[in-house]
Amino acid sequence: MKNLEALKYPIGKFNPPAEITAVHIYSWIADLAILPQEVLTAVNHLSKADLATPYRPDGWTVRQVIHHLADSHINAYTRVRLVLTEENPIIRPYFEDRWANLHDAKTGDIMLSIAILKAIHERWVTLLRTLKAADLQRTYFHPEAQQQFTLAYLVGNYAWHGKHHLAHIKTLK
């Protein structure tokens, strides 16, 4: 059996560069732009049984992961807009595990969440491509982490987040 840590983090944990450059930002935005299509491609061959399969012992099912991506990235998109329109906003965390255990996340049509992901990412990427360097240095406060982060960090973290869960989905191949 694979190491549990490797199953939880198949691409490793997010490790941002010490200095986030424009090259990083462009690359991360490109990752966000293609994620919905990559998710769709990864699930095209999956059966209902595959979608009901956890990606690791005691983990979410693939269906829950797909719904989580939509839920999480809706929140991320909202956070970007808050950061751009408020001074150092305190973002609102949410209980991801509880959201993933709601009926729609456990049984709902994955194509609905893929459609959400596609729409949110189109809006999000369109917005991100307009940002100036100063915008990316704007900050928010995360009360769970008790830490302030930059918008640049958020972009990288969610580009990683998409790839992280895409790797979970692809483990069923």
Image (cartoon, helix red, strand yellow):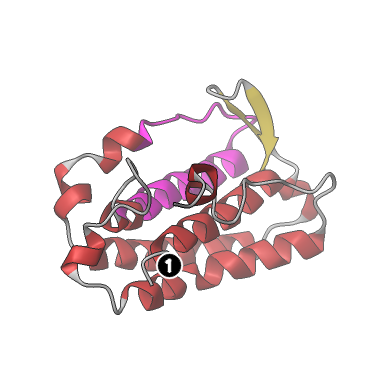
* Tag 1 secondary structure: helix
| Relative depth, front residue between 72 and 129 | 72
Q: Which residues are magenta?
A: 67-96
* Residue 126 in view: no
Task: Provide residue 51's location: percent of width, then percent of height.
Answer: 24, 62
Q: Residue at x 62, y 70 (%)?
A: 30
| Relative depth, front residue between 36 and 124 | 36
Task: Provide residue 42's location: percent of width, then percent of height.
Answer: 39, 73
Residue 154: quarter of image: top right
Q: Is residue 70 left or right of residue 152?
A: left
Circle 1 packing at 10 Å, graded few (<14), some (14-19), many (20+), is: some
Q: Residue at x 43, y 44 (%)?
A: 75
Please, what is the three-letter code of the amino acid marked with disc 1? Lys
Please determine whether, in this image, residue 50 is positioned above or below residue 106: below
Q: Is residue 158 left or right of residue 65?
A: right
Q: Residue at x 31, y 57 (%)?
A: 62
* Residue 51 in view: yes
